[in-house]
Amino acid sequence: MYERLRTYLIVAAQAGLAAELSWFITRDVLHSAEPLFAPAVAIGTIAGAIGNRIRRTLEVIAGLTVGAMVAHLVTRAIGGGPAQTGVVVALAISAAVAIRGTGAVTAQAGGTALLLGSVAPGPDLAVSKTESAVVGGVVAIAVAYLILPLNPMRVAHRIVRPTVDAFARELTATADALTHRDLQQAKDALQRFSATREQRQKATELVAAAQQVVVLSPWRRRRLGMMRRYQHAAEHLEDAYSSACEMVKWATATIRAGEPVPAGLPASIEHVGQALRLLYREVLPGREPDPMRTRALQAIKDVNEACAEGVEFSGGVVATRVRATVSELLQASGLPQAEANKQAGLKADV
């Protein structure tokens, strides 16, 4: 909870600053009839879409424009009232769908049409709201990328470290469960492993946000190379997680079925966890990947020995998943897919 609060503290500060600036511009500079709408859009843009604020801003403006136009045209033609409001909302949503708007565009169009249609506004109110939305969105982008940008590496470290630690910790627990044939320990590890989905999704979102800051903010541009490594690694770590989750499932099945467990099988899983830790500590900061790759290839050596000694069906699936996970980690460290698959003992098309 403390780490999450620290991560989002800057977001709260950005939202507060964007709200203040957008209110000032719409009320005191533009003398808008709807000054509250700009800070509402600014706050929604910053707090509601950390990973892609420019797209969020465009969606808000597009949805609001569609809703305002439909409300203005329909109320001018048939007037206002409860029945007319229903027609306005239905037509606004239909128009948003027709232009292939996202869910956010559709929701914004419907909400704007409801608000404007229910009070039978004139053209000035519709124009004022659209103007305020543009101000709020532009101010939010300026605050997020120019005035008070996130520290991308601090954000990445805070969110990626606990995610990687949880990933590696459950691999160690699984290896220990296999070694001691502890079915309950394996089940617990699988349950905890599966429960990290939300944490991983949040990590992916925040890494994308940090990447966008580095690209768009001139003050953070020097971190571009490191953030590209994080982004590249994040894509392969997601696939590594999927393979590792299957690995843990089949390790549990191996224990449940009473299949033989050669020493190399749990050792390979433990080495995968160690390679994962080295990926975060050594490779992502820009150091040489050799220690991490050595540990990953040790996992392949161990699993080869286990297969030579003899594994049955479930154990064989564990071995295959170990290879797939290692391949993803090697790709995360910078190896091409074909070379990573070859070193992991996988076919070229896997």
Image: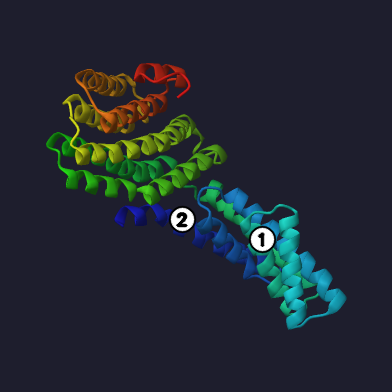
Secondary structure at numbered mark 1 = helix
Q: Position of residue 120 (x, y in %)?
A: 77, 78
Disc 1: which residue:
106
Identity of the residue furthest to the left in this view? 180
Disc sitting over residue 11 in the figure: 2
- Which residue is drawn at the image coordinates 54% and 41% (left, top)? 217
How many residues crowd around disc 2 within 10 Å: few (fewer than 14), some, or many (20 or more)? many
Compared to residue 316, the image places residue 251 above or below, namely below
Image quadrant holding the N terminus, namely: bottom left
Callout 2, which amino acid? Val
Which of the 4 image quarters holds residue 301? top left
Callout 1, which amino acid? Thr
Disc sitting over residue 231 in the figure: none
Compared to residue 125, the image places residue 338 above or below, namely above
* Camera-nearest residue between 86 and 280: 86
How many residues crowd around disc 1 within 10 Å: few (fewer than 14), some, or many (20 or more)? many
**How far apart are the alpha carbons under marks 2 and 1?**
26 Å
- Which residue is drawn at the image coordinates 46% and 22% (left, top)? 337
Q: Position of residue 31 (x, y in %)?
A: 71, 69
Compared to residue 345, the image places residue 60 above or below, namely below
Residue 100 visible in the shown view? yes
Q: Is residue 239 left or right of residue 162?
A: right
Q: Position of residue 172 (x, y in %)?
A: 21, 37
Q: Position of residue 280 (x, y in %)?
A: 33, 33
Secondary structure at numbered mark 2 = helix
